[in-house]
Amino acid sequence: MSKKSNYKKLMTESIFVQAPKSTTSIINNNSDAFDFFTSKRVFGEKNNIDEAPAFSSLEAKQHVDKDLVLMSKYLGKASQQVIKTMMDGVKGGKYDAMDLQRGIQMGPVKRTHFGETDFIQQLWRKVRSGFRRYSNRGKLR
């Protein structure tokens, strides 16, 4: 009886268990087999999952880039108007900053479209510290 550990036997004698031929042929014939670690197809990968699909033409890419700049400009102007409305309400004494924050978070859903409340809340987080100067104690409430 040998006193070598199983690990040492495995490493020194180079005896590895061979997989039966029948199981490997099933994997080879399966075009939908995915690698466990990378989540990519094992065989016949035609479209890379990590890459975005290409534009239909170079001209289409240029038009999309140009329109995205225009859309960004519109959103910038809209966000300025939203912040101005917030400031006017607090400066005019209609409500304080905490009332504004509570109104953004709670209330009827029908007031805005999907995503608009999230957009307004992001703007509020961006300019919240600027509202401290309009309160009596330097706090939001």
Image: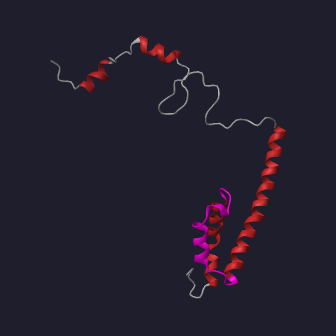
Query: Which quarter of the figure is the C terminus placed in?
Result: bottom right
Spot occupied by residue 126 in the image (x, y as percentages of width and height): 63, 68
Q: Is residue 92 above or below residue 68?
A: below
Residue depicted at 64% across the width and 84% down the height = 134
**Please, is residue 49 above or below residue 20 in the view?**
below
Say whether residue 111 is magenta.
yes
Colour mapping used in the image: secondary structure
Q: Quadrant of residue 63?
A: top right
Q: Taking 84 as reference, is 6 left or right? A: left
Quarter placement of the N terminus: top left
* Residue, far left: 1
State the extent of the magenta-drawn residues as a range.
91-115
Give coordinates of residue 85: x percent, y percent: 72, 74
Q: Compared with residue 95, is residue 42 higher up or lower down, i.e. above or below?
A: above
Q: How far across and down, in percent of the image, does residue 47 sit? A: 65, 29
Q: Residue furthest bottom?
A: 136
